[in-house]
Image (spheres, grey):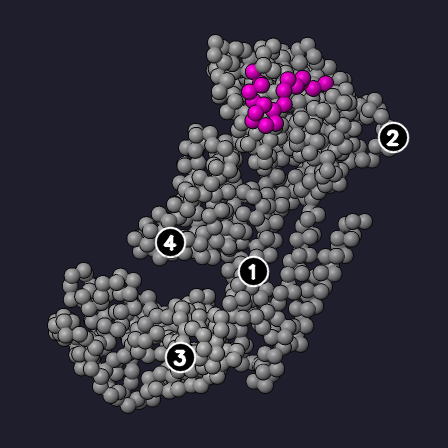
Amino acid sequence: MNGLFALASALRERGVLGLNARNGEFMLPWNPRRFYPLVDDKVLTKTLAREHGVSVPEVYAIIEIPRQIRELKAQVAKHEEFVVKPARGSGGEGIIVITGRTHDGYRKIDGSSIDDHELAFHISNILAGIYSLGGTPDKALVEYRVNFDPVFDAVTYKGVPDVRVIVFLGVPVMAMVRLPTRKSGGRANLHQGALGTGVDMATGKTLTAVLGTRIISEHPDTGVPVSGIEIPHWQTMLEIATRSYELTGLGYQGVDIVLDRELGPMVLELNARPGLAIQMANRAGLRTRLEAVLRDRAGLPGPAERIAYARERFAARLS
Amino acid sequence: MSKLHLYLLAGLLVLAGGAATAYKVLVLGFPLTPDQRSEIWRVELQLSYDPDGGPAKVLLGVPSATGQVSVMDQGYAARGYGVTTERTPNNERAIFSIADAQGRQYLYYRVVVDLSKPAAAQPEPPPTSRAPNFGPDELLAAHTLVDEARGKAADPRTMAEVLLNRLNLARPGDEASFLLGRDPMRVQARVPVVAVNLLLLAGVPARVVNGVLLKPERRNARFVRWIEIYDGQHWLSIYPTDALKADSRYLLPWWRGPALVAHVHGGTNLTTDVTVSRSLEFSTRVAVARQRALEHRLIEFSLFGLPLQSQLLFRTLLAVPLGAFVLVVLRNVVGFKTFGTFMPVLIALAFRQTGLTAGIVFFSIVLAFGLVVRFYFEHLKLLLVPRLASILIVVVMLIAALSVVSHRLGVDVGLSLGLFPIVILTMTIERMTIAWEERGPKEALQQAGGSLAVAAVCYLLIQHALVRHLLFVFPELLLIVLAATLLLGRYTGYRLVELRRFRVLAK
């Protein structure tokens, strides 16, 4: 029992944020419920992002009723590659990545093929809400397939690496790169087995990583060290992150950014309930940084000041 | 500011709940613990029928003349009816009569008995001998059974036991099953009647007794039958099954003879519904006069004024908030993962029908089979609503199959499985599959285990005698439960499991 209290007070000292505190002290007061639909529905998120000049993958088609599925073939005719995903999906479920054509259909990213019929069935499942939060009817999104920048190739096992930035009241407070592993099946969600590496907010360089609850320094599948990789366009990413606050009005959110080879950083999705494992990836507590923002936010009028503040205050401690 | 507000509100609630409870304990003398020695039971019988229109008369057997337990109080509630009682050598009957009955009629009878004070055993006069009631074709079979039993029995008592045993072991085609008749539904009820006739044939005075098992407290209690034989001085009870014998302390003899408890003249569709519960009338510490006054206040101030049926319901209902509170603690302070928010509480309520061990076993079996089927359905790529409906159908079939199998195996608890909430099972299967697919088997099993563990804790709590007693007698305590839950709503400390999760950060 004593050990538990000691552990709890050690964590408190390091400023580690627990679920109850995240929900009770940061999400409930700073995330008005009426703004949640903006991030839960990717179609709304994209519309908003485009209005605010934040770069997002281009939408080829939005399918809302089963009748529209028939028009899909014509709509994607001029795109060799595209992605089909549910608008209200979670955890990377229901996403199909098409990388080419076969003689009777499409080529999926894993090399298997899928014909028009199977694709139509998949989309009708999305519409019925199989992949959506709470099983409510959904829309299907057909969009640009991000052409990933090769910077993370050596530390990625088949899939979509992205950068998750936690933004509090417009200040980027903590970031991590989420790297798919063999176990995560190409998905970038930490609870599915993906790797998360911390990021030095000052330089955009990766630190050590967390896998489950372990701290590691090499990718489990490729064996390549994960630290010291410099994320390109770091300043742009911070700008995108800080602007997402004005975009949604959510005080506490996670911004998932992917890096396209030609188009640079793009917002993939926003998350109103970002997880807490990012603290282990950075070996730092969120609460300390969140409280610093609460204290100093009066002196941070615009995005430029907020980014400068983040780069200075949340630089990785040398240890 | 808002925290202060919350603390004030919680403090106010605690104060109100505490003060009301203290007043009831200190001034009104309500007991803080359920008095386990109290053997006072209330039995309520609801009787209803459709009158033909015009005069109607209902004859209801009442237990006041059975002479073995002391009847403390009895009463009738029958609007518009005249009530008289009538004594026969063996029974007492209440006669409800009305000149003009229209629409379905409801009559109530209530009796309070004290099992701790058995009536003094006085020598009883020998009964007038009766002739056995056998048809000419049955007589031969009856004689065979009696002769067979005579060879094994030493006295009337063993004779009766041998005969009951023989009837219980009747095999199709033998004498015993011939006498019991062909209807399998009625064999149980016929055994005591046939046994009595066989005993009469053997020259042993005997009679059938009908009664109610008072334990456990329940709604829809059923009448059971056993027999009594006369040993020259007293009537001795002999029970047809071991289970009944084990519970014989809690049997309330109601009426004698093979007739039904009630008859109606001038009406049809007579149904009876019996509710039994242990009365919360209190220990001898309270003086009799005080107890009278108290009873008045009880009815004024509490749930005791409700009909017995609703009282039993409320005893469980009032414990549910405590289950919800425990759920909050286990989820937000300990960090248990469960399916859905209140699923564990609902599962705990379902366990009340089956008991804990059997409940967990059945739940796991249905869940496991359901998961297998659900994984198969996954290949069929069904849309959401038809998929859920299909799982529901499978769950119902699983429950039916399990009931049959467990009944075959002699586990009676399987019969109460029909009441297991199918919708909860369906949703659990669906959620578990999704968790399995999205988050892996480990996470899914963790959540399932967490749900069951939380359900078990909630169940143990809402079934606890002291908890049920306290919340039923002092419903104001719920204000304190509410206050504690509100305070937990602002608990922003670590969850127990997070200490483990983040332990690398403590270094």
- The amino acid sitting under disc 3 is Leu
**Which amino acid does the dot numbered 1 rest on?**
Leu
Q: Chain of mark 3?
A: B
Residues beneath discs 3 and 1 located on the same chain: yes
Rounded to the nearest angstrom, the CA distance separating label 1 from label 4 is 24 Å
The residue labelled by disc 1 is B317
The residue that appears at 50% across and 78% down in the rendered structure is B78
Q: Position of residue A20 (x, y in %)?
A: 67, 42
Q: Nearer the viewer, residue B245 or B353?
A: B353
Distance between mark 3 and mark 1 Cα atoms: 36 Å
Q: Name which residue lies at 50% across and 17% down.
A: A116
Q: Chain of mark 2?
A: A
Of mark 3 and mark 1, the one earlier in the sequence is 3
Q: CA distance from mark 3 to mark 2?
A: 89 Å
Q: Residues within 10 Å of mark 3 (few under 14, many from 20)?
A: many
Q: Are marks 3 and 2 on the same chain?
A: no
At mark 3, the secondary structure is: strand
Does the stretch in magenta take in A58? yes
Which residues fall within the magenta stretch? Answer: A55-73
Q: Nearer the viewer, mark 2 or mark 4?
A: 4
Q: Are marks 3 and 2 in contact (CB under 8 Å)?
A: no
**Residue B400 percent location from the top left of the image:** 37, 49
Mark 3 lies on residue: B59
Name the mark on residue A299: 2
Secondary structure under the numbered disc 2 in the rendered image: helix
At label 4, the amino acid type is Gly
